[in-house]
Amino acid sequence: MLTKPIAFLGGGQMAEALIGGLLAAGACEPASICATDPVAARRDVLKSRFGIRVGDENAKAVREADLVVLAVKPQAMSAVLSDAGQACAGKLIVSIAAGVTTAWIRERIVTPRGIVRAMPNTPALVREGVTALTCQSDLRSDDLAAVRTLFEAVGSAVSVEERLMDAVTGLSGSGPAYVFVAIEALADGGVRMGLPRATAELLAAQTVLGAAKMVLERGEHPAKLKDQVASPGGTTIAGLYQLEAGGLRSCLMAAVEAATKRSQELGR
């Protein structure tokens, strides 16, 4: 359980997901969490939904916290740290901003206890997210445990080298959008073949969910699982032929590459 105060600078969807996950898991009490946001309506939503403390003064929230989550857009990070950077002395800092490096953050804050860069994804909203973490080698074990508690409350967490974080952004950070497009397209195909829209969407979404669960739980290569579905001369291999002809595999790879490059640009 996290017993020390936490400040979320930024009260958007991801902050909401993390706060909700922590409280649902019983990992901390509402009174130990403060969230700041420049939009009053957003602060009101977080306060009414979770019973946490809210405000619009970043520096004040940081001074009163032990763990600080930088949950703002990359474009807003400079302004936020110019306001709150002096108050970060001795604090554990966690950033979830795409493309923003730990070195860049360190230049703009005063003697933090540690800095962790994290890339969660939107399925954290339903506590099925995955977060990549990059931590300095001398991070205290209790601080690392606190960070893992934060993100494992909304899914799973993996550790990666910081040089790979832009690739993480391109894959798992942006990946849910690619999957949503795939689900929509599968459902549209079902509708084209005569299925009712609601039925087609349910079939498509549950199929994707079930296939993903098989990959995670069986530990087998996706290609092997694919081959188990595709019998010789059958329906599945006919469909797979069309996917290959349409370039689905290369399109998905190119999407990860494009999103990775954009993450790199945001960090410059």
Image (cartoon, rainbow, N blue to C red):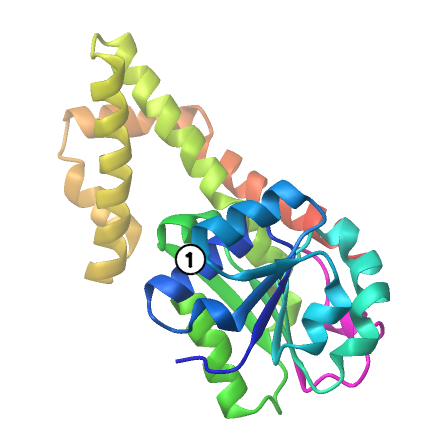
Q: Amino acid at mark 1?
A: Gly
Residue, x 77% and y 52% (percent of image)?
76
Residue 258 showing in the rendered view: no
- Using the rendered view, name the quadrant where residue 25 is placed: bottom left
Residue at the image position 27 percent from the left and 15 percent from the top: 197
Q: Residue 23, how many percent across, how many down?
A: 39, 64
Q: Quadrant of residue 264?
A: bottom right
> Which image quarter holds the N terminus?
bottom left
Q: Nearer the viewer, residue 163 or 128?
A: 128
Residue 162: % across, % down: 64, 70
Residue that numbered label 1 is attached to: 20
Decide whether the magenta segment is chiefly helix, strand or loop.
loop
34 drawn magenta: no
Q: Is residue 228 left or right of residue 90?
A: left
Numbered range of the magenta stretch: 98-115
Q: Secondary structure at mark 1?
A: helix
**Looking at the rendering, in which quadrant would you find the C terminus?**
bottom right
Q: Nearer the viewer, residue 29 or 110?
A: 29
